[in-house]
Image (cartoon, coloured by chain):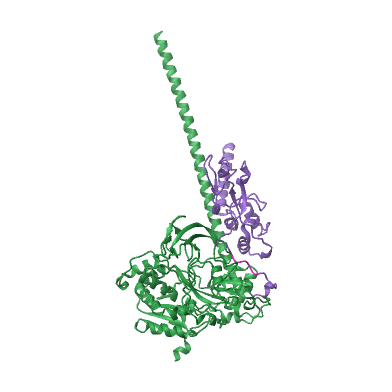
Amino acid sequence: MLRNLFSKPRLRGGVHAEERKSATESSPVITHFPLPKKLYIPLQQHVGKPAEPMIKVGDTVLKGQLLAYSQGMISAPVHAPSSGLIVDVNDYPAPHPSALPIRTIVLETDGKEEWLTVPVADDPFQLPPEEISLRVGAAGIVGLGGATFPTAVKLNMGRENHVQTLIINGAECEPYLTCDDRLMQERAADIIDGVRLMLHGMGTDYAVVAIEDNKTQAYTAMYTAALPYAQIEVIQIPTRYPMGWDRQLIRYVTGKEIPVGARSSELGVTIHNVGTAYATHKAIRYGQPLVNRIVTVSGGAVGQPMNVEVPLGTLMSELFEFCKVDTNKTARIIMGGPMMGEALPHSVLPVVKGTSGVLALTQEELRDKQEQPCIRCASCVTVCPAGLRPLDMANNIRINQLDTAVDLGLKDCISCGCCSYICPSNIPLVQYFKYASGEVMARQQAQHKSEQTKRLMESRNARMERIARQQAEEERERLAAKAERERRLAEEAKTEAEAVEEVS
Amino acid sequence: MYVLYAIISLTSLGLLLGLLLGIAAKYLKVESSPIVDELESLLPGSQCGQCGFPGCRPAAEALAEGKASPTLCPPGGAVLVEQIAMLLGVDVDLSTVTEPELLVARVSEDTCTGCTRCFKVCPTDAIVGAPKQIHVVVADACIACKKCIDVCPTECLQMHPAEVTLRNWRWAKPKPVFTVESDALC
């Protein structure tokens, strides 16, 4: 009791955003989405290096066949989401606010949905833990909460750091999104199996599934599914955005604060999303790589909001058509949740591994209000889960004092959007931080380039000097050789002359 | 005899003064200002001459003497201005500094004759090629000095704005609706 009084609060900042989940949370996931004619599969759907294609145009592939292999330590492979013909490997718009081109494989589906059969272990718990992370890596599984960090790397880090606690993130704190909620309600046993496989893969014997207390049905389903397994605990956590932020969740569940620059596995905690656990179950039990995912399609402009299981590479425009989106009413298209998601310029973009939701919002749902002067109410300071002072940071960024902003903790900003959400003056705080983070990175790159330029010039100058020296030496040698030759000729002429004289 | 005295006294005087000068040269040596070296290391070092000085060293000397403004270097951009201002301890108005537009040279493959002139003048070895082969500019190493443009006989080398890709795309700065007085900061 007394200790609780003096201990640090386990929840910092956060907002109670309007949930707006009711449109999709009570209807089952649609699994009969008509197979698109063409699938657009970007080669980078994860954090790290893009995958390298290993098929060529004209190849016929089976569902689940490897299309592009992972390069380097932090990367993930890409698999065929359906069977069919490869018709193009080229640049197509990326599901990104800029919609700039990204290397994409285009697959024309043949409608047969023929799976590539892969041998699976009868009892995966007999496999060595390394084998679990190898298979998870080969299945192209990445963090499905939206961060898309390769899961196998995280499992390996967990094993190497002897992690004691595995937290399964079922918070789903973003408004509108219900894909994890529905997944937990409908496929709880599979998720729990995935969690057990993850525990085995990391060599850990304790897992906590944390679910926000607004998802009572999901909690009940998960609780029931986890009952037979003593090593898995299912708990309810308060509903407060951004509860699903890994550091906030770890702080709430374990009481541990992860220091700046440290990784959670260094403190003995690893966190995975429920969707990732489900994908792990699919990969290990059935040998199915990550080729489809559940996407929440919601928002005011959506006629039939729902959760749909779609193959990766499905165009969002086809999803919108299926869900009867009124394009005239759509004021903004967002991939992800409304708080941290990214606004897309159009909907002819593919669904990727990190697409938890696609929202079509109407003008009324947006908060595009006139910006007012800062009244220094410090609401943003109160709600910042990272403990920063958004108003000071934004003021400094406004006058280009980026160094000061970095000193104030710009790099610890997670762009959760709480400050912008709460600001009574509608100041676009997060946009300032996103701009500044990009600018700081650009400056670092410029610095790096100028160092590289200096190095290149020095090496060039050194080479030029060396060549000049070599040429001078060669010239000297040539002259010396010439002199030598002339001397010898003269000598020969002399001896000849002497010989002639003697003869005469 | 007088001649000998004169020789001895003048020789010893010369030796003594020489020794004094030698000591003075060693202990009272005037080094070049360290701040000039530091400034030179900040400047890009490409000797492009856009500041109006013959190179980065003279520009650094002028900066150290206060004869030039910290905003003199166009390729350095706002970052450099900030660094110089911090080193010299002066205040600059960063709002007047325009970020340089990123340019890179590009070879037009239709008109390149493979004459090798461009890569011989490239200060950073950013152009690769061989005689009678089409040359290529390595965009990451190009510093936009435009030396290759001047020597190209067929004008196949042109400066183009650097391509925006997913790797270097950035969020724009929000347009300020209100101006904030700098002393309103805490």
What count of labels does the image hold? 0
Main secondary structure found in the magenta portion: loop
- The picture's colour for chain A is green
Q: Residue at x 62, y 52 (%)?
A: B160
Q: Position of residue A408 (x, y in %)?
A: 57, 73
Is residue A273 among what the camera can see?
Answer: no
Within the image, what quadrant is residue A332 found in?
Answer: bottom right
Magenta stretch encompasses residue B156: no
Q: Quadrant of the C terminus of chain B?
A: bottom right
Depicted A483 relative to depicted A13: above or below: above
Image coordinates of residue B44 in percent, x first then y, are: 59, 55
Front residue of A10/B84: it is A10
Q: Nearer the viewer, residue A83 or A273?
A: A83
In depth, the one of A450 and A348 nearer the eye is A348
- Write the start and end of the magenta stretch as one range: B170-174
Residue A387: where, in percent of width, then height? 54, 78
Which chain is drawn using purple?
B
Residue A23, horizontal then vertical, whole percent:
54, 81
Q: Is residue A110 visible?
A: yes
Q: Residue at x 40, y 84 (%)?
A: A223
Is-magenta flag for residue B171? yes
State the residue lying farthest toward the bottom. Answer: A1
Quadrant occupied by the N terminus of chain B = top right
Residue that extends furthest to the left in the rendered view of this protein = A126
Q: Residue furthest top?
A: A504
Determine the image quadrant of residue B80. Answer: bottom right
Pick the residue in front: A242 or A484. A242
